[in-house]
Amino acid sequence: MAEFQFQQVDVFSSEPTKGNPVAVVVGADALTTEQMAAFANWTNLSETTFLLRSTTPDADYKVRIFTPQTELPFAGHPTLGSCHAWLATGGQPRGDTIIQECGLGLVPVRSQNGCLAFAAPTLQRSGSVEPFLLRRVADGLKISFSSIRAAAWTDNGPGWLSIMLGSRKEVLALEPDYAALSDLSIGVIGPWDTLQDGKQAQFEVRAFAMSCGVNEDPVTGSLNAGLAQWLIGSGLAPEHYIASQGTRLGRAGRVHVDQEDGKIWIGGVTNTLVTGVLRL
């Protein structure tokens, strides 16, 4: 039986327990894929990650990301939580920007103003959604087809298909038929009304990741990255905004989106809430 450093990191909220937790196993090179998958299934968090030595001189470390059911090439809040744990356990970046290696390739991560932020990776699939599929999404979300203001593929690994509704209220009212959409991962976004909702954020987001084994993810970096690329690129969102997520789950997620020099950065506050030793 081997021992490994372990952290559980809360991501995308300055309030403890109000973000999205990720379990991080540090120095996990000795673990097999089967052991990683079994531990991720046991934690039953939306994602569990394993920090490894990089396999390329261009990266500072490598991460493998597992849901309770499958391995992902990339995910957002696990990227920030894993980087937080790597730094907290003595990781030293080689340059001003930390470079993470994952299944999707190399992902830059930076620290700024008390937050970590990753550069949104290139979308694996973008563009319009087939009308028959969009109608199926509307039926599964129990909304009228006409209430969908815009839609696009925003897939950067988990398979995201995203739609925009007319308001935060519409987003929060959704009661999906998860079984009817079990093979899909759907992101939903709607604008805040400054008079009714306040000014703490500009958009409300929900992430229904059934195809990854998670009905609703509390706060989702990969989805927000894809949403930002779609919405900013099509003029539906400004270059700088804050997205709220997790409200229906009792969370207070805040995702900071910034486009700078052609790159979109997805950031938020990260805090370690649990440290310990894993024995496997």
Image (cartoon, grey):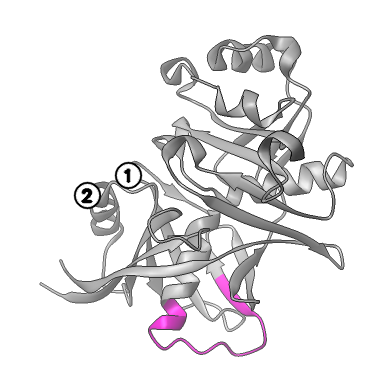
Q: Is residue 70 left or right of residue 101?
A: left
Label 2 vs 1, first from the N-terminus: 2
> Residue 149 location in percent, x, y?
78, 23
Q: How far is the residue under mark 2 from the one under mark 1?
A: 7 Å
Amino acid bearing label 2 = Trp
Q: Which residue is mark 1?
A: 68
Of helix, strand and loop, which mostly describes the magenta segment?
loop
Above or below, 223 relative to 214: below
Does the CB distance between marks 2 and 1 fall below 8 Å?
no
The type of residue carrying mark 1 is Pro
Q: Residues within 10 Å of mark 1 (few under 14, many from 20)?
A: many
**Which of these two is toward me, 233 or 69?**
233
Q: Name the residue carrying label 2.
A: 42
Taking the image as drawn, is residue 101 in sight?
Answer: yes
Q: Residue at x 56, y 78 (%)?
A: 56
Going by the image, does 217 lie left or right of 174? left
Question: How would you rate the neighbour count of disc 2 (Cα within 10 Å): few for under 14, some for 14-19, many for 20 or more?
Answer: few
> In the picture shown, does residue 169 fall above or below 59?
above
The residue that appears at 52% across and 53% down in the rendered structure is 73
Is residue 124 something one can see in this rendering? no
Q: Which residues are magenta?
A: 86-100
88 magenta-colored: yes
Expressed as whole percent of the image width and height from the top left, the position of residue 185 reads 54, 32
Disc 1 is placed on an element classified as loop
Indicate the quadrant containing the C terminus: top left, top right, bottom left or bottom right: bottom left
Q: Position of residue 87 (x, y in %)?
A: 46, 82
Q: Is residue 213 above or below residue 71?
A: above
